[in-house]
Amino acid sequence: MAKSDAKERAEMMAKEWKKSRSSTRSLNDLVEMGLLHNQELGGWRAPEGESYPDPHAGEIVVFDDFFKRGFGVPIHPFLQGLLLYYEIGICNLHPNSILLISTFLHLCEAYVGIEPHFDLFRYLFCLRKKGAVGGSKIAG
Amino acid sequence: MKTRYLICPWNTSLTEWYKRWFYIREESGSATFCDVGYIPEKMVSWTDRPEYTGQVAELMSLIDWSRLDGPGVIGNFLVRRVMPCQRRVHSAYEYAGSQDPTRMHRDGLEKSEVHRLMNELFNLTDDNFVRSDDQMHAFKLGRPTPKVNDYLCLFVLLCEYCRILTDDLSLLYCR
């Protein structure tokens, strides 16, 4: 990557991301609440002072608030399918979008008695860019 | 088709959630798209609606929308301690109770904890919601979904009963 490209990317990342306040302690609180598996089983790690995320191979970046809204890893194939269809990444979603998808999945499975229905989802919802909160990378 | 959906009074004053990010490992072979430098641009697929809505209309009619709302559905998966967006060994309609393998935790949640979580997720200041005693019940192993075959069996049994009845009547008549 050329030096100017690297600088441009660093500037963009600094604009889009804020230094994380998540810590091993705060993530263990999620474990205590039964929302996240322990570090060994769940394979998570807290950032170590990075200004923006730089995941290792095989890692994804997620937000604490996702886990209070029905998110978990491994990710449900329906959610993976939605990401592919809308061409967005998991870290482009707002926590309330995760809650909306969780609600839809549970509605289909537990109240209609079917597997999540893609056309029903598309009929009910559309995707749009969110406001400034969380950066211009957020859609929901 | 008129659009109806669950009333969901989202907590829209969620603050600083974007300052709480971390890394999590995916199992090998899984490739969830996650480019931290990607800025999505609006695409046709974002607002496109399905072309054929016949089945959608049928599904919408299966839900008694007057007896269900967002907090009811979410309260149900919180109490079950399952994560709907997580891949699970079986679907929610096969949920087997406290020993179910899809639960994140064996212990049940205290009522106060459920309320605390719900208050975090919703703005529940207005009480324009479905009364809890009138809520639709979720399916589970002990309350299975009606199957097409069930209706078929019922029909066959009914036919059989009618045949026996007719036979009996004819016997009676013959005598």
Image (cartoon, rainbow, N blue to C red):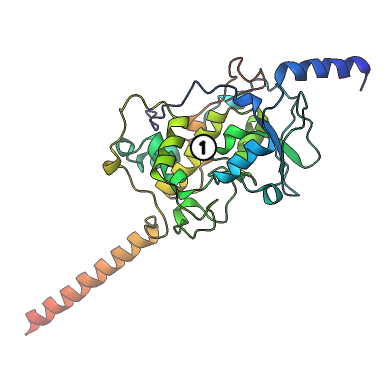
Answer with the quarter of the image where residue A71 lies. Answer: top right
From this view, report whether residue A136 is shown above or below residue A72: above
Residue A121 is situated, as x and y percent measured from the top left of the image, at: 50, 35
Would residue B100 be found to the left or right of residue B161 on screen?
right
Q: Quadrant of the C terminus of chain B?
A: bottom left
- Tally the numbered discs: 1
Which quadrant of the figure has residue A131? top right
Tell me if A21 is positioned left or right of A140 in this view: right
User: Which residue is at a point 53% across and 23% down the rendered structure image?
Assistant: B14
Callout 1, which amino acid? Answer: Asp
Would you name the residue on which mark 1 appears?
A119
Instruction: Chain letter for mark 1, please.
Output: A
The residue closer to the viewer here, B64 or A29, is: A29
Residue B27 percent across, percent down from the top left: 72, 49
Depth check, front residue: B53 or A123: A123
Q: Secondary structure at mark 1?
A: helix
Q: Residue at x 37, y 35 (%)?
A: B69
The spot of residue A38 in percent (x, y) is 65, 48
**From what the image shows, is residue A51 above or below residue B91?**
above
Residue in the image at 32% along x and 40% along y: B64
Question: In which quadrant of the rendered view does residue A49 lie?
Answer: top right
In the image, B158 versus B19, the foreground residue is: B19
